[in-house]
Image (spheres, rainbow, N blue to C red):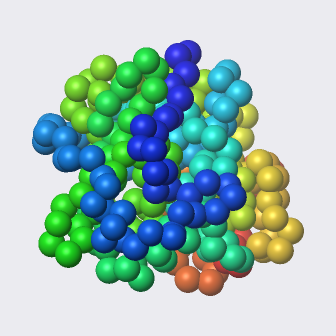
Amino acid sequence: MRQHQTHTSFPLRLHSSRRGLLVGLSMSALLMLLPGRAPAVSTVPVQVHHVGFDRHAQAPVVILADAESSRFLPIWVGPFEARAIALALAGTPAPRPLTHDLMKNVLEHMGVEFQKIVVSALKDNTYFAQIHLLFTDRSVEIDSRPSDAIALALRFDRPIFVAEDVFAESSQRLPAPLRTISATVMGIEVQNLTAELAEYFQLPTAEGVLVTNAAQDRGTLQRGDVILALEGELIRNISDFQQKTLQENQSVRLLVRRSGQNIDVILIRR
């Protein structure tokens, strides 16, 4: 499997580093130093299908999917960025603002409108992205690593796009090794079912998610449970589970397959 690394070419590094965030310059002065806008490109709207760990590449990976979830674009990221994206997908706030939370707070405080992000190019096995902002009626595009751009787009609830030529060149049908990637949702680690797992749990299809590690304070879920439905709605995969939990409040009722029996379990949000 070819591993793509992310990279930023913008020397001011508007995304924050592990050690802090560049906030010394005023936003007006900072925008004056930005490079000119790139020509518009044809794009494909995508969504984050899920985040997990690719055991072959030994690295976290973000899977972007088109509207029909028929084609997938894997982007390998660092563990810090993977956690930031997973937390945003799960709707789980950090006890204190993480780097991307801080960046969001700074942009909002300064009156900057976050419009969208575009994964715009693939050069030498490295993906490039742009963050599109609007500040005092001026459109600005900022170079970014795709992982940072995605983490911010999810926090702002803004759309994600991939350049059409990049998507055509690098997207693929989700390969089998990635189908069992795990993710953490509401403090519960789950993975997609495979045909083999469905047969083992005596299920007619591979729809549902398998609990691989359950937090002790989130209710009565156990490792090895298969989550089949949430509040009466069927769960097909990790992405489905993530989206449905975002719509719920403090607790949700799950239909779970355990020891060959279907039971109801209450999952508590923390």
- Image position, residue 230 (x, y; %): 55, 67
Residue in the image at 17% along x and 66% along y: 138
> Would you say 219 lies left or right of 170 here?
right
| Residue at the far right in the pictured view | 216
Residue in the image at 53% along x and 63% along y: 22
Relative to 26, say whether 203 is above or below. above
Q: Quadrant of the C terminus?
A: bottom right
> Would you say 107 lies left or right of 209 here?
left
Residue 207 seen from this side: no
- Image position, residue 224 (x, y; %): 79, 49
> Would you say 132 lies left or right of 61 here?
left
Number of marks in the rendered image = 0
Relative to 143, say whether 88 is above or below. below
- Image position, residue 178 (x, y; %): 57, 30
Name the foreground residue: 66 vs 157.
157
Q: Quadrant of the N terminus?
A: top right
Residue in the image at 81% along x and 65% along y: 215
Residue 115 seen from this side: yes
In the figure, residue 96 lies in which quadrant? bottom right
Name the foreground residue: 162 vs 146.
146
Residue in the image at 20% along x and 75% along y: 136
Relative to 57, say whether 252 is above or below. below
Relative to 205, say whether 213 is above or below. below
> Would you say 83 lies left or right of 135 here?
right
- Image position, residue 54 (x, y; %): 64, 30
Name the foreground residue: 212 vs 138.
138
